[in-house]
Amino acid sequence: MNGAQSEKAAPASLFPSGWVGEGGVTLNFQADGAVSGSTGCNRYVGQAQLRGDRIDFAPLAVTRMACTPGLMAQESRFLAALGAAERAAIAADGRLELYGPGAAEPSRFSPQPATR
């Protein structure tokens, strides 16, 4: 195991938690396994299952508003990353990392401040 991998831990629980990624995309996990958030353009909802470090997102329902080409491209990349995600880890810096097959880099998310 290399040094980079030894600094990552399987998330004990992502349910509930909130995360924000590049471009302002959000990923929110609810206690019942529901997920929701924003792609930066549209909103989405669905379910996720976490078993150890293995994560699986069920097909997501996504609103279909038209946005700028840049936001639409961001949305496509984000939804593809969620659909391909196989493994989740919490990095030493506290960020959530989602790994998919063949991805050069994981998708990274910072903890979202709690709002009340």
Image: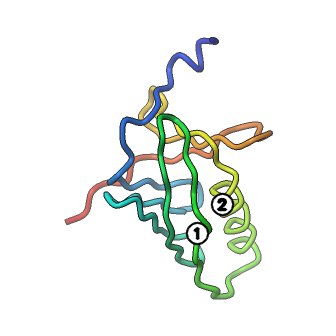
84 w.r.t. 1: above or below: below
52 w.r.t. 62: above or below: above
**Mark carried by residue 78:** 2
Q: What element carries label 1?
A: loop
Q: Looking at the figure, which quarter contains the C terminus?
A: bottom left
Q: Residue shown at 53%/74% (left/top)?
A: 44
Q: Residue furthest bottom?
A: 65
Pointer 1: what residue?
A: 39
Q: Is mark 2 on a helix, strand or loop?
A: helix
Q: How crowded is mark 1: few (under 14 residues within 10 Å), some or many (20 or more)?
A: many
Q: Residue shown at 35%/51% (left/top)?
A: 15
Q: Point out residue 91 in the picture as x, y percentages from the top left corner.
A: 49, 30
80 and 94: which is toward the camera: 80
Q: Residue shown at 48%/40% (left/top)?
A: 51
Answer yes or no: do the residues labelled 2 and 1 have beta carbons within 8 Å?
yes
Q: Which of marks 2 and 1 is nearer the N terminus?
A: 1
Q: Residues within 10 Å of mark 2 (few under 14, many from 20)?
A: many
49 and 82: which is toward the camera: 49
| Disc 1 residue type (three-letter) | Thr
| Disc 2 residue type (three-letter) | Phe
Q: Looking at the figure, which quarter contains the N terminus?
A: top right
Q: Which residue lies furthest to the right in this view?
A: 102
Q: Residue shown at 68%/87% (left/top)?
A: 66
52 and 39: which is toward the camera: 52
Q: How far apart are marks 2 and 1 (CA)?
A: 7 Å
Quarter of the figure with residue 60: bottom right
The answer to whether 92 appears left or right of 106 in the picture is: left
Quarter of the figure with residue 75: bottom right
35 w.r.t. 100: above or below: below
Q: How many labels does the image show?
A: 2
Q: Point out residue 101 in the picture as x, y percentages from the top left corner.
A: 75, 41
Quarter of the figure with residue 11: top left
